[in-house]
Image (tube, rainbow, N blue to C red):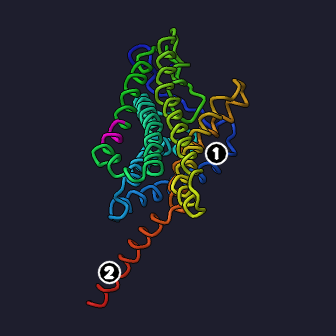
Amino acid sequence: MMEMTNGSSPHVFVLLGFSAQPSLEPVLFAVVSCFYVVAILGNGTIILVSCKDVRLHTPMYFFLANLSFLDISFTTSIVPQLLVNLWGPQKTISYGGCVVQFYVSHWLGATECVLLAVMSYDRYAAICRPLHYTVIMHPQLCIGLALASWLGGLTTSLVGSTLTMLLPLCGNNRIDHFICEMPLIMQLACVDTSLNEVEMYVASFIFVVLPLGLILVSYGHIARAVLKIKSTEGRRKAFNTCSSHVAVVSLFYGSIIFMYLQPAKSNSHEQGKFIALFYTVATPMLNPLIYTLRNKDVKNALWHIVSGNCSGLGKKQEQI
């Protein structure tokens, strides 16, 4: 008999994940492990160079460091438990672990939406208002926008996740996914969830649709400004300034939109798991690669740090 807590909530949840395809689990374990290590190293490197290199003490890299820290936190809230479930026959997660996971993933997901919109505004100010850029994006505003992103995401998570946690589940504990998410917990409830659904739709509009709209408006103005640049070199510089952010936004929103536009069929649900796997594991790994490979400032800063450490080590050895 299933153990219960508070008469309605199970002590553990069963995350079915990819158990319907057991031969695939060892492959996924290896791939996810590699992606996770690269995500931690890549995002950690961006945070390191953004802090250590004075030339990167600009609004763009301040927000990029926030995004990298967010990606590390987001993927860490999901991947360790996923790896445990992929490794062996045990597919469970404790009630507390599940609650923490959907609180944190909801918080960081909403924060990333707002942060990407803030970064697009930064690019708008840099390209459309270059002479006033330092005045517009002053340090106090940057800190305020970053705090607003984090606190806004935290607020919507506290409201939505708490309402979800209060739902009686009447012993239902099998989640057909590899992650605890609000919509999945709501499906287990044995009462009417209309209030929760309304809250979720309102929060989705505020923290997903509105930021996407702001991003599109910002890049509409950027595109118009770039088209007015007469020199090819000027256009190329403007394009390089925005291309990395556009790629990251496309990866993030593209996977979300593709997942939620799928029809409600069993095969679509299985596809949805892989899309969710992409934006929870692959996207945090790809973001630092996009910004590093396409950004000379980051590559130069990384080279200076590495070469400086090597020369310092060489001098110490000579002294010895």
In the image, residue 68 above or below residue 220: below
Q: x%, y% of residue 43?
A: 45, 55
Establish if 315 lies above or below 223: below
Mark 2 crowdedness (10 Å alpha carbons): few <14, some 14-19, many ≥20? few
The kind of secondary structure the magenta stretch mainly shows is helix
**Residue visible at 47% across and 12% down in the picture:** 195
| Quarter that holds the C terminus | bottom left
Q: Residue 142, position in %: x, y?
A: 33, 45
Residue neighbourhood size for the residue with mark 1, other residues' Cα within 10 Å, grouped as few (<14), some (14–19), many (≥20): some
Q: Between 214 and 154, which is closer to the camera in this rendering?
A: 214
Q: Which numbered marker is on residue 82?
A: none
Name which residue type carries label 1. Glu
**In the image shown, does 34 or 232 lie closer to the viewer?**
232
**Nearer to the camera, 257 or 194:** 257
Mark 1 sits on what residue? 25
Which of the marked residues, 1 or 2, is nearer the chain's N terminus? 1
Residue 312 has which mark? Answer: 2
Do residues under tags 1 and 2 come within 8 Å of each other at their CB atoms? no
Between circles 1 and 2, the one closer to the viewer is 2
Say which of 243 and 188 sits in front: 243
Figure label count: 2
Magenta segment includes 92: no
Measuring 51% from the left and 62% from the top, which residue is drawn there? 295
Q: Which residue is situated farthest in the top direction here?
A: 192
**What is the span of residues highlighted in magenta in the rendered image?**
144-148
